[in-house]
């Protein structure tokens, strides 16, 4: 397997070099509670298709607000819960998650965005809703404006921020909330891997003794539908190797999360350091990136890949994006995908390996010789 010869054009984002700093967590959590309305209706939301970090962070902040202000916030999402683990999390913990289109026409006195930021392109939050707070661990958008902002790109998970708020305010978590936050930190940092910081480690061990391990097992080992496995067959069949980068197109997918799951899975290939997985979900192209290499920032690469087509962003090692297929763009969907793949290969320095090699010999998935 040939190795990388030249450096790509894009290396690091400012976040990649950011150093962890001391936060006045008590002061920040006090300001958060002061920024939200003291009466009325409060809404918490995240990116459209929330992951465990988004769901658990929202759940923790609901608990904080209820105990400190007596208000009863609601949680809403603009998309779906695609992965089996995410659905199991909401069912096992009895989290009430409402579709955004049901709640957006109600009156809201304050909206809190968690694990997401307005204008990032991964949320359908209506513009007229009054955002009073943003809590996130993704790189801060330059144009971000809100009465309260706590964005910590040094952190591996937004749930870590939520844990710090609970501890600073003297809020005790029960087994269900502890399990949700524990799982969120583990999954967001890839089992306490490269994106972990000291704050994540402290939060992880603070939760440890309260975790319901049977509950955690039911969430992480949730049953999945039979047709789910056809995605893996399709992803492997369509996969092509370009040096140490792997690309596959899943075509039509049942949930946007499918591209992220496949990107995680394919990154385990012994020779692969970068994966790109694309799919067509309803009226949009979605894609997901995963890196094991440290000389690139996946969020910066994803943003560059989506330039002039849509939006992209994420973390050092995991990122994604989406492109709305409005007319006349829908007629050029295949060409857009080709452009996205070409940009990816150029940015990761694997352009010279086109047209690539099939991952498996022809017929190997069907058992033919």
Image (spheres, rainbow, N blue to C red):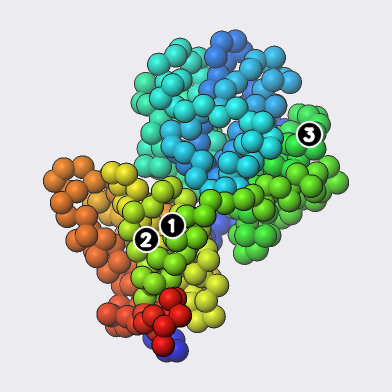
> x, y percentage for residue 315?
50, 56
- The residue located at (44%, 67%) in the rendering is 233
Of mark 1 and mark 3, the one earlier in the sequence is 3
Mark number displayed over residue 259: 1
Horizontal side, residue 246 vs residue 323: left or right = right
Horizontal side, residue 25 vs residue 234: left or right = right
> x, y percentage for residue 248?
37, 67
**Residue 118 can be seen in this image:** no
Of mark 2 and mark 1, the one earlier in the sequence is 2
> x, y percentage for residue 283?
28, 44
What separation in Å lies between label 2 and label 3 (alpha carbons)? 40 Å
The residue indicated by pointer 3 is: 173
What separation in Å lies between label 1 and label 3 (alpha carbons)? 33 Å
> x, y percentage for residue 265?
53, 66
- The residue located at (75%, 37%) in the rendering is 176
Horizontal side, residue 357 vs residue 97: left or right = left
Q: Above or below — where is 240 with respect to 327?
A: below
- Bin the neighbour count of mark 1 within 10 Å (Cα to Cα): few under 14, some 14-19, many 20 and up: many
Horizontal side, residue 305 vs residue 316: left or right = left
The residue indicated by pointer 2 is: 250
Single out the residue that lies furthest toward the front: 368
């Amino acid at each position: 397997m040939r190795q990388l010869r030249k450096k790509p054009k894009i290396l690091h984002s400012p976040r990649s070099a950011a150093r962890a700093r001391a936060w006045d967590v008590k002061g920040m959590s006090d300001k958060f509670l002061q920024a939200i309305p003291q009466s009325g209706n409060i809404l918490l939301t995240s990116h459209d298709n929330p992951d465990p970090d988004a769901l658990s962070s929202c759940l923790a902040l609901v608990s904080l607000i209820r105990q400190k202000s007596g208000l009863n916030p609601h949680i809403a999402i603009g998309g779906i819960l695609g992965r089996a683990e995410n659905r199991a999390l909401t069912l096992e913990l009895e989290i009430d998650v409402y579709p955004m289109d049901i709640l957006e026409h109600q009156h809201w006195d304050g909206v809190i965005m968690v694990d997401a930021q307005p204008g990032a392109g991964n949320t359908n939050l209506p513009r007229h809703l009054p955002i009073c707070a943003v809590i996130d661990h993704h790189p801060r958008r330059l144009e971000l404006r809100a009465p309260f902002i706590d964005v910590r790109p040094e952190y591996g998970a937004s749930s870590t921020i939520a844990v710090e708020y609970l501890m600073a305010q003297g809020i005790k978590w029960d087994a269900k909330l502890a399990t949700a936050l524990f799982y969120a930190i583990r999954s967001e940092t890839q089992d306490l891997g490269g994106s972990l910081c000291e704050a994540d480690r402290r939060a992880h061990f603070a939760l440890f003794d309260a975790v319901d391990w049977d509950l955690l097992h039911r969430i992480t080992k949730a049953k999945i539908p039979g047709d789910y496995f056809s995605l893996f067959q399709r992803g492997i069949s369509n996969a092509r190797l370009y040096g140490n980068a792997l690309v596959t197109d899943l075509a039509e997918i049942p949930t946007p999360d499918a591209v992220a799951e496949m990107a995680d899975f394919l990154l385990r290939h012994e020779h692969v350091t970068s994966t790109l997985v694309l799919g067509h979900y309803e009226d949009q192209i979605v894609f997901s990136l995963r890196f094991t290499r440290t000389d690139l920032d996946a969020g910066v690469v994803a943003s560059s890949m989506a330039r002039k087509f849509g939006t992209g962003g994420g973390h050092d090692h995991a990122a994604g994006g989406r492109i709305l297929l409005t007319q006349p763009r829908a007629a050029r969907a295949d060409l857009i995908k080709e452009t996205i793949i070409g940009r990816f290969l150029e940015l990761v320095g694997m352009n010279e390996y086109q047209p690539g090699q099939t991952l498996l010999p022809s017929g190997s998935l069907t058992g033919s010789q």
